[in-house]
Image (cartoon, rainbow, N blue to C red):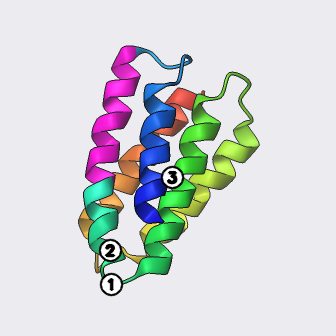
Amino acid sequence: MVEDTLKRIEREIIGNDNLSQEKKQQLTGLLTELKEQILNLNNTNTIDAASIANYAETSIREATRQEKSSELLSHSIEGLSLYAKKFEVSHPTLIGVINTIGQTLVNIGV
């Protein structure tokens, strides 16, 4: 399930006509880091790994839509941030990636 979500995110980024090639490369690089961290978490905490992947998918979709909703983007990134707080101590690298993705999406969504 987590792997399927991560593949959908990758397809969303690559196939998105609203993103420049530079932004696609930036998000794809962050997604590669996120995959590694989420799959690691998935070994011990499947439910939370799936939730993080789902929030990441929603956040990316909202930030890259033609007609953006700042409210929906804010809520989806807030969901990611809540997970960042939950795993702050046990998975600091995951949190760094989540925070970077969130900031990148906020910048794209502006």
Name the secondary structure under disc 3: helix
Name the secondary structure under disc 1: loop
Residue at 56% in and 18% down: 18
Q: Residues within 10 Å of mark 1 (few under 14, many from 20)?
A: few
Measured from the top left, where is residue 56 in percent x and y? 51, 52
Residue corresponding to mark 1 = 44
What is the magenta segment's predominant secondary structure? helix
What is the CA distance from the residue labelled 2 to the residue labelled 3? 15 Å
Residue 23 to residue 39: above or below:
above
Q: In which quarter of the image is residue 55?
A: bottom right
Residue at 72% in and 46% down: 72
Relative to 88, is 60 on the left or the right?
A: right
CB under 8 Å between discs 2 and 1: yes
Kind of residue at disc 1 = Thr
Name the secondary structure under disc 2: helix
What is the CA distance from the residue labelled 2 to the residue labelled 1? 6 Å
Mark 3 or mark 1: name the one nearer the start of the chain: 1
Res 41 label: 2
Residue 49 to residue 44: above or below:
above
Q: How crowded is mark 2: few (under 14 residues within 10 Å), some or many (20 or more)?
A: many
Is 9 included in the stretch rendered in magenta? no
Q: In which quarter of the image is residue 91?
A: bottom left
Is 28 included in the stretch rendered in magenta? yes
Measured from the top left, where is residue 103 in percent x and y? 45, 42
Residue corresponding to mark 3 = 56
Mark 2 or mark 3: name the one nearer the start of the chain: 2
Residue at 28% in and 63% down: 37
Q: Give the range drawn in magenta.
A: 21-34
The mark lying in front, picked from 3 and 1, is: 1
